[in-house]
Amino acid sequence: MSKIKFEAIQSNFKILNPFKDFAEESHLVEVRRDPLLGDTSVYNPFYKDKAKFYFGVCDAELVRVLVEGSAKNCIFCGESVGKITAQYPPDVIPDGRIRVGEATLFANLYGAGKYHPVISLSSAHFLKLSEFTPELIGDGLRAAQKFLNMVYVKDPSALYSVVSANYLFPAGASLVHPHLQMLVTPMAYSYHERIIDTSLTYYQKNNSSYYSDLIEEEKKNGSRYIVQRGGWHWLTAFSPMGSNEVIAVHERECDLGLLSEAELSDLSGGISRVLSFYESLGHLSFNFSLFSVRESPKKGFHCLLKMITRQNLYPNYRNDDYFLQKMLHSELIINTPEELAQKLKAYF
């Protein structure tokens, strides 16, 4: 018997549709519960008809104007990134910044944690999602790993790290230029802490890792499992925390600082493929987060990547988070995880 329960509850209701002469219309709503955290997401097949209303179509001219206007004073462009971005003191980074390929890591002027570097990913000010190559992403992750291991040497309280991307304004980015942000802290922030604590509880109850069991179950099920690349398993989330969520789980490692060069390459290659897939769906803005824990007695946690799409850019665009997501912490499913996984397999 499976230790993991994929719980979904369906409800039916009827309305009289004014756009169809008030004809009676039957709807179905499915509420899914995340097997580990218990978070819920909601699916109504009719939402597909409203997908353009929810996300709109990117306005190419608006994107062009925003890109050109923001490039004029971008501190991540050209020589600026190596001259006027903040540096770390020599006791943290001897050279103040870390450079790997086109990636440059530097201190955030407005940190949200004990260590909060920013990583400029490319010399280009703007990239289509299909232009986020494995090399660009990989060099950014290598810079993050190098920084993390430098911090580990000097600070035993640095236990938790997250490497995240906010691309374009709908995803929360204040600058257009492709970049990553990293947090290394002595305290795990809320969602990260929930994952760690529930993973430990699961391990203590079942004497096995939730993520190892999840990989086994999803491989067996097949409808959400995509592929294995090296130590990484790629799948869609049963109960997504965001639109078009794709996750990657490392089969054993919990610490970004210990990942091998091959494992970083496999991860960056997978991220690049998912972003190309997102572009094929008509999206341009996205978030991802790579969660990591320094080796510790807490069992059951694995390195975990979560990727989602965000609202498209068009005049008077709406935010894609409203009360359902922000206040009820429940996500709205437009594309089912099963459909998403089947389409994404072609990109691997």
Image: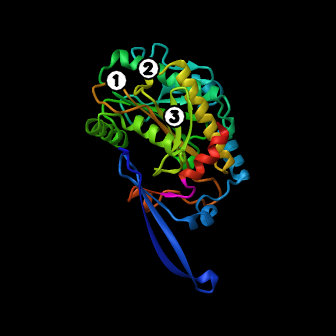
User: Predominant secondary structure in magenta?
Assistant: loop
Which residue is labeled 2 in the image? 258
Find the magenta span and give its range: 332-336
The residue tagged with tag 2: helix, strand or loop? Answer: helix
Which residue is labeled 3 in the image? 233
Spot occupied by residue 330 in the image (x, y as percentages of width and height): 42, 57
Which residue is labeled 1 in the image? 295
Q: Along the polypeptide, which appears first: circle 1 or circle 2? A: 2
Q: Along the polypeptide, which appears first: circle 3 or circle 1? A: 3
Spot occupied by residue 155 in the image (x, y as percentages of width and height): 32, 19
The residue tagged with tag 3: helix, strand or loop? Answer: strand
Residue that extends furthest to the front in the rendered view of this protein:
1
Q: Residue at point 34% right, 25% down?
A: 158
Mark 3 or mark 1, whichever is nearer to me: 3
The residue tagged with tag 1: helix, strand or loop? Answer: loop
Describe residue 265's horizontal placement relative to residue 200 as left or right: right
